[in-house]
């Protein structure tokens, strides 16, 4: 039982400690780096204990008897600047705790405003008309004694509030001088993300190289004589899934937040499932290396780019990972959708790979994709369902396209054309393969367009105002027209039909953008 898993562990066990060692070597310094708030004071040394400085026999600065001595070097000068900054901050803190706000002409307190999802604007409701005129009651002015009493009470309340504020600030020093204000550093997010995700890249690469080795050396054919395709792939994946689980638990314990586990695990599962599908597509190590590099870049862009836009945490789990690392936690309403679509993509890719071993050695990459899709896409309802389920893959590729073409944002035509090609490829793939199974191409075109529209709107529904729901008919009709165009022209070949329908789609996108920018 589990002979394939045991053999995989025996052959690849030497890589396990390497993965964990690399993960720790990256994670721990990264956490320390961010914890130091990017001051880099720990790079410097002094002859006495100083915050963020190390004590050394050959220090960068020498402090004694109210004098600071520096060496004739750039590092020593930088250490002195850092020391002066520490002294100034501690002196300002001492002034504030002893003299309060009177010690400083200007103080700035920073209030962090959480940025959640963009709320859908509520529909405007006109106020109800009043049938009876509103009666304004005039109260007599208060007497002089009452006015004095009210002012006295307000003054006492104000003094209590100020006292509490001073006590709070004196304890936690929640104040800033204008010169000490620092904007949030975006680099902090990427340091954490890379530190957590990089070990997952190593695990997926070890798996893909082992899987490819079985394919090239003919071990798969031998193993399939005593095992089914599904059982072989499951046992092949089992050691790596266990390794990803252990790594996810370790990271969750490290950051003391259980929500980190499903985030890291879903990302790792998606990576190895994509690598399994890449091995299926590749005919040699050269193709595997090229496709792996491209796909790794796509995944990285998909995971990290949404982390910049923290108001859409359900798009990528890396944003929620940032919240967990900072101690803010992750709400369940965001955690489920942000991890569910990654697990869904992983399951789909693993199902496709486990049922496609007979196509591993044949045809080109596009030919394999068409053959595998045609094998499954043999009913009308499957056209609708498969197209809707392809939306996470469409978003993954489109986000990468946006990241690559971002420098060309002033020339939006390449962006519109690229996005149109991605969308028409997935819709056309199911139309083309349905026709290979003798299904009516025009019915398949309508179902493919409808499935794409439904899946797209289900993903983006929470970000769209309800007032725009009436305009959904226009993009639905546009999708149907483009799909029918593909069905009419696919007799000239898949690629030509894709070019024609994508050109029409890009023209439509361009007109929409032009109308919005007028």
Image (tube, rainbow, N blue to C red):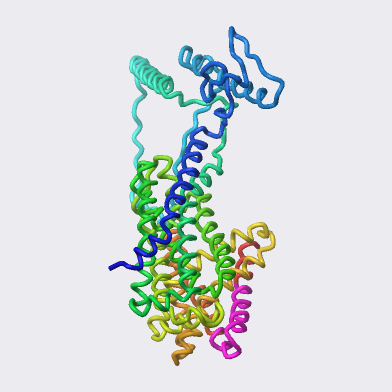
User: What is the x, y in percent for residue 429?
Assistant: 51, 80
Residue at 40% in and 85% down: 380
The stretch of residues the image draws in magenta is 486-508
Name the outermost residue toward the bottom: 438
| Residue 44: % across, % down | 59, 26
Position of residue 367 measured from the top left corner of the image (x, y, whole percent): 54, 82
Q: Residue at x 62, y 81 (%)?
A: 500
- Report the front residue among 219 and 114: 219
Question: Is residue 228 placed above or below 30 in the rendered structure?
Answer: below
Q: Residue at 34% across / 29% down in the picture?
A: 139
Which residue is at 66% across, 18% downward?
A: 70
The N terminus sits in image quarter: bottom left
Instruction: Return the x and y of residue 66 as percentages of the image width and height.
Output: 59, 8
Task: Examine the image and state in which quarter residue 61 appears.
Answer: top right
Q: How many marks?
A: 0
User: Residue 21, relative to residue 441: is it above or below?
Assistant: above
Task: Considering the whole magenta stretch, tell me its main secondary structure.
Answer: helix
Name the quadrant of the C terminus: bottom right
Front residue of this view, candidates 282 and 375 = 282
In the displayed structure, 450 sits above or below 512; it is below
Q: Is residue 507 left or right of residue 464?
A: right
Out of 95 and 516, give the one closest to the viewer: 95
């Amino acid at each position: 039982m589990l002979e394939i898993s045991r053999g995989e562990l025996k052959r690849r066990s030497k890589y396990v400690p390497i993965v964990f060692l690399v993960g720790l070597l990256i994670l721990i310094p990264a956490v320390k780096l961010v914890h130091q708030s990017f001051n880099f004071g720990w790079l410097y040394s002094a002859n006495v204990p100083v915050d963020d400085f190390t004590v050394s026999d050959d220090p960068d600065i020498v402090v004694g008897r109210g004098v600071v001595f520096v060496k004739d070097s750039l590092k020593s000068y930088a250490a002195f600047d850092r020391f002066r900054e520490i002294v100034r901050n501690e002196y300002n803190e001492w002034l504030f705790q002893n003299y309060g706000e009177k010690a400083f002409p200007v103080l700035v307190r920073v209030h962090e405003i959480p940025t959640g999802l963009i709320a859908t604007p509520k529909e405007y409701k006109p106020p109800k008309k009043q049938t009876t005129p509103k009666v304004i009651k005039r109260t007599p002015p208060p007497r002089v004694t009452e006015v004095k009493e009210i002012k006295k009470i307000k003054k006492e309340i104000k003094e209590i509030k100020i006292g509490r504020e001073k006590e709070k600030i004196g304890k936690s020093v929640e104040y800033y001088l204008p010169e000490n204000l620092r904007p949030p550093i975006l680099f902090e997010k990427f340091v954490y993300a890379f530190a957590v995700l990089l070990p997952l890249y190593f695990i997926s690469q070890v798996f893909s190289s082992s899987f490819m080795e079985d394919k090239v050396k003919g071990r798969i054919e031998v193993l399939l004589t005593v095992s089914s395709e599904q059982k072989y792939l499951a046992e092949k994946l089992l050691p790596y899934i266990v390794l990803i689980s252990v790594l996810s638990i370790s990271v969750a314990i490290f950051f003391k937040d259980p929500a980190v586990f499903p985030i890291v695990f879903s990302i790792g599962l998606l990576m190895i499932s994509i690598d399994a599908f890449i091995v299926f597509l590749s005919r040699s190590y050269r193709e595997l290396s090229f496709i792996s590099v491209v796909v790794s870049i796509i995944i990285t862009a998909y995971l990290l780019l949404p982390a910049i836009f923290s108001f859409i945490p359900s798009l990528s789990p890396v944003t929620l990972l940032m919240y967990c690392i900072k101690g803010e936690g992750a709400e369940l309403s965001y955690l489920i959708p942000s991890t569910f679509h990654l697990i869904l993509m992983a399951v789909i890719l693993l199902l496709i790979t486990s049922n496609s071993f007979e196509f591993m050695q044949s045809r080109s990459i596009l030919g394999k994709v068409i053959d595998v899709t045609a094998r499954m896409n043999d009913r009308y309802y499957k056209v609708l369902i498969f197209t809707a389920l392809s939306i996470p893959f469409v978003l993954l590729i489109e986000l990468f396209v946006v990241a690559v073409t971002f420098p060309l944002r002033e020339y939006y035509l390449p962006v519109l054309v690229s996005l149109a090609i991605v969308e028409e490829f997935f819709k056309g793939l199911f139309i083309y393969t349905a026709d290979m199974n003798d299904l009516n191409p025009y019915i398949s075109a309508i179902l493919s367009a409808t499935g794409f529209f439904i899946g797209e709107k289900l993903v983006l529904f929470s970000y769209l105002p309800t007032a725009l729901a009436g305009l959904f008919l226009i993009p639905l009709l546009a999708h149907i027209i483009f799909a029918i165009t593909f069905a009419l022209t696919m007799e000239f070949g898949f690629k030509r039909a894709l070019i024609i329908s994508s050109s029409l789609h890009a023209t439509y996108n361009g007109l929409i953008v032009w109308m919005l920018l007028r």
